[in-house]
Amino acid sequence: MSFGASSFWVPRPTLASGDSFSFGRWFWTVDKLLLTFVFALVGCGVLAVAAASPAAAQRLSGARFQYEDMYFLKRQILWVLAGVPVMLGVSMLSVGWARRLALAGTIVFLAALLAVPFIGSGANGAVRWIQLPGFLFQPSEFFKPMFVVTTAWLLALRFDDPGLPTMQASFGLLVLVAALLIKQPDFGQTALIMVVWLVQAVLAGMSLWVLAALAAAATAGLGVAYLTVNHVSERIDKFLTGGGDTYQIDKALDCFRAGGIFGVGPGNGQAKFHLPEPQTDYIFSVIGEEFGMIACLIVAGLYIAIVVRVLLTLLDEEDPFILLAAGGLVTEFGLQASINMAVNLKLLPSKGMTLPFISHGGSSFLALSIGMGLLLAFTRRNRFLQASPYVDRWWTR
């Protein structure tokens, strides 16, 4: 192979096809270590839901419907069988097609968010879901990864033309989404999306003075919410003073105490039967009881490994869009996991946020699968050809 006056040979795998969607190209460019970490996390999730399923079935059974012990496990397996192919399919997209998917998804799921106040279904005082045949669809879960990629695209345009008001446009979209989420109300998702946007904006060159002003505004907004929204003030008061109804967190801590270092063993947990939402919000406590502190550290270690792996991959990234999109997606993923685990350990007020790929739930698992598929697409690299400055990055088109 020759390039003008210089010639050299670079070992290259045989690819199955010349198009950007071929399995051969995907196999040689996908980050296999990152994919291994994700599959390990999904496997841990199936085991965790298996442990939580009897407690959830007993807690949710009533006069109108009786859940069998493994009902939630069976549903989780179905979501895994549906979600994993979606994740792999999205990861095979080129960067260009992944961006188009996210832009289209932003429009679709923003429309769904706008429709929630009119046709949404409520639970526990919040209206966040739309009833579909067979399951409840939560638009905000699907909107999050789409929003992250869309804002990355807008902010990346600043690198081509600094005069474009893309920072203002992305901030306007953030304000609209925050207003829709607060109306549900869903303050946890609102805070998560705002933090992710701030990380992307800083990476895109936001002034530290503007960052400080936004941080001050966010703090003031939290103060206003504390003074005017009972839901917010009650949770903060419980967290700070330990007063009022602390049933949820007390039962979560009982699970960790019962499990100790090695756990009581699969199926032997008793404290989990007193947990609220053991299959979703408090599934990390179920892991603590049945599998012990070591298992909890392994799960936390997998989240850390995923975040660190992506950040290491991005250290030498020169494309601002990929840097902002992948950086935003992994920030969202890591923050959501951290918030859920911190709530279970009484380090943060209750947020009603699922543990990624561990908690039971169709909307959550499918949305996370799409988000991780986008992250895998943006972190694809050809390790054989990456060192050559003469090779076009065909997988980004």
Image (tube, helix red, strand yellow):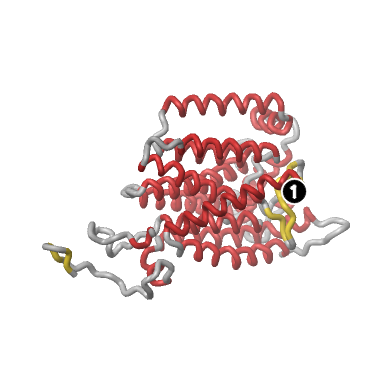
**Side of 149 where 10 appears, left or right:** left
Location of residue 103 in the rendering, given as x and y in whole percent from the top left corner = 52, 52
Q: Nearer the viewer, residue 67 or 183?
A: 183
- Name the quarter where the C terminus is drawn: bottom left
For disc 1, the neighbor class at 10 Å (few under 14, some 14 to 19, many from 20) is: many
Location of residue 124 in the rendering, given as x and y in whole percent from the top left corner = 76, 44
User: Which residue corresponds to the image point at 63% horizontal and 24% vertical from the top-left?
Assistant: 223
**Side of 81 where 303 appears, left or right:** left
User: Which residue corresponds to the image point at 41% horizontal and 60% vertical from the top-left?
Assistant: 33
Q: Is residue 347 above or below residue 365?
A: above
Q: Nearer the viewer, residue 73 or 158?
A: 158
Q: Is residue 196 above or below residue 40?
A: above
User: Which residue corresponds to the image point at 69% horizontal and 33% vertical from the top-left?
Assistant: 235
Q: Residue 249 lies in what quarter of the image?
A: top right
Q: Is residue 39 above or below residue 248?
A: below
**Side of 264 where 303 appears, left or right:** left
- Name the quarter where the N terminus is drawn: bottom left
* Camera sees residue 54: no
Q: Residue 360 lies in what quarter of the image?
A: bottom right
Q: Which residue is mark 1?
A: 120
Q: Is residue 73 above or below residue 16?
A: above
Location of residue 102 in the rendering, given as x and y in whole percent from the top left corner = 52, 53
Q: Which amino acid lies under the numbered mark 1 shown in the image of this protein?
A: Gly
Q: Tag 1, which secondary structure?
A: loop
